[in-house]
Amino acid sequence: MENGAKNGAQLRALGERLVGDQQAIMRAWRQSSKNDPELKTARHLSRSRFDDHIPGVLKAFAAQLAAWPGAGLVAAEAVQERRGAQHGAHRWQEGYALPEVAREWVHLHLVLLDLFEQYAVRDGVDHDT
């Protein structure tokens, strides 16, 4: 298999894992955020209001991975941007300060990085991917 095709297949598989492991990702993100003493506003939100647009963000990210490097990548990136903006607007409406939103994103990114590392080790993902 050509290197680009192999990378594309591995990225699609990662996207499928993001969707398949969404509940575990959300759980880990909620717990990580809850354990952060700097995130005070999140403690006052219901689970559904805390989760907000993040399941859609994960699905949009999976679509980006599946589209790479094809013609659909630009459209997938636009959806991802829109989902992120919706999440930010929701957090603003909930009374979040910008540093809190940024910290929440950091927690989500760390959870995703852990998943990517586990996936890479377990499934032998190429370094280029």
Image (spheres, rainbow, N blue to C red):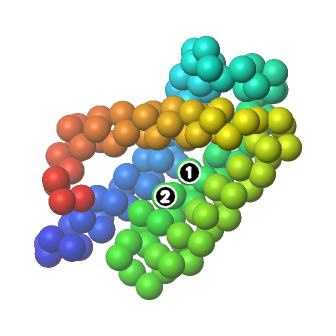
Helix, strand or loop at label 1? It is helix
Residue 86, quarter of picture: bottom right
Helix, strand or loop at label 2? It is helix
Q: Is residue 19 above or below residue 62?
A: above
Instruction: Indicate the position of residue 85 as horizontal and vertical percent values.
Output: 69, 58
What type is the residue that disc 2 sits on? Ala
Q: Can residue 19 be seen in this view?
A: yes
Instruction: Indicate the position of residue 88 as horizontal and vertical percent values.
Output: 71, 49
Q: In this view, does 75 lie to the left or right of 13?
A: right
Residue situated in front as seen by the camera: 29 or 7: 29
Residue 105: assigned label: none
Q: How many marks?
A: 2
Q: Distance between the Cα atoms at labels 2 and 1?
A: 6 Å
Q: In this view, does 105 lie to the left or right of 68?
A: right
Q: Count residues near mark 2 (Cα–Cα under 10 Å), then give few for <14, some for 14-19, many for 20+.
A: many
Disc 2 target residue = 62
Q: Which residue lies furthest to the bottom in this view?
A: 71
- The quarter of the image holding the C terminus is bottom left
Residue situated in front as seen by the camera: 29 or 40: 40
Q: Count residues near mark 1 (Cα–Cα under 10 Å), then give few for <14, some for 14-19, many for 20+.
A: many
Give the residue at x 50% y 37%: 106
- The quarter of the image holding the N terminus is bottom left
Residue 51, quarter of picture: top right
Give the residue at x 43% y 72%: 67
Instruction: Indicate the position of residue 126 as horizontal and vertical percent values.
Output: 16, 54
Q: Is residue 31 above or below residue 85?
A: above
Give the residue at x 64% y 45%: 54
Give the residue at x 81% y 21%: 44
Disc 1 target residue = 58
Q: Is residue 16 above or below residue 38?
A: below
Disc 2 and disc 1 in contact, CB within 8 angstroms:
yes
